[in-house]
Amino acid sequence: MTKEDRRQQLLEFMKEHPLALPPLLIYRNLKLHKDVTFTADSVRNYLDEFAEEGLVLMVEKEPLDEGKLVEAEAGTRPYYIISEDGRDYLSEEESP
């Protein structure tokens, strides 16, 4: 499986399960539901790449208690959730 295949699998999983979660929980659920063979560190790296590309949002966890998505500050431990751009990207990938 190529890096791009792994990235695609992760982003598709996030689309199927649009939850704001920390990287380790995303990884554990990928193992549980998709039996992935890549590591938790790979998930963290891919999430950082996705954030730079605008495919996921990095959000603060505390505002989630009030049902709000607030962009994470630098140096915090963010939660990740797929963005509309991430959904659009997957839709484009699926189109012929």
Image (cartoon, helix red, strand yellow):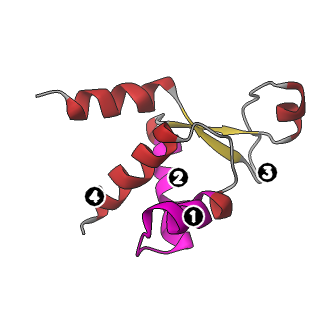
Tell me the quarter of the image containing the C terminus: top left
Tell me, yes or no, whether the highlighted magenta stretch contains residue 44.
yes
**For residue 81, above or below residue 23:** above
Q: Which residue is mark 2?
A: 47
Closer-to-camera residue (69/33): 33
Residue 46 in percent (x, y) is at: 46, 57
Badge 1 is on which residue? 27
Which numbered disc, 1 or 2, marks the residue that appears first in the sequence? 1
User: Amino acid type of disc 4?
Assistant: Asp
Residue 93: x percent and y percent? Answer: 23, 35
Measured in 3D between alpha carbons, the distance from the residue under mark 2 to the one under mark 3, in whole angstroms, is 15 Å
Q: Residue at x 17, y 27 (%)?
A: 95
- Residue under pointer 4: 5
Q: Which residues are magenta?
A: 26-52
- Dot label at residue 83: none
Instruction: Point out the frontmost of discs 1 and 3.
Output: 1
Label 1 to label 2: alpha-carbon separation: 11 Å
Residue neighbourhood size for the residue with mark 2, other residues' Cα within 10 Å, grouped as few (<14), some (14–19), many (≥20): many
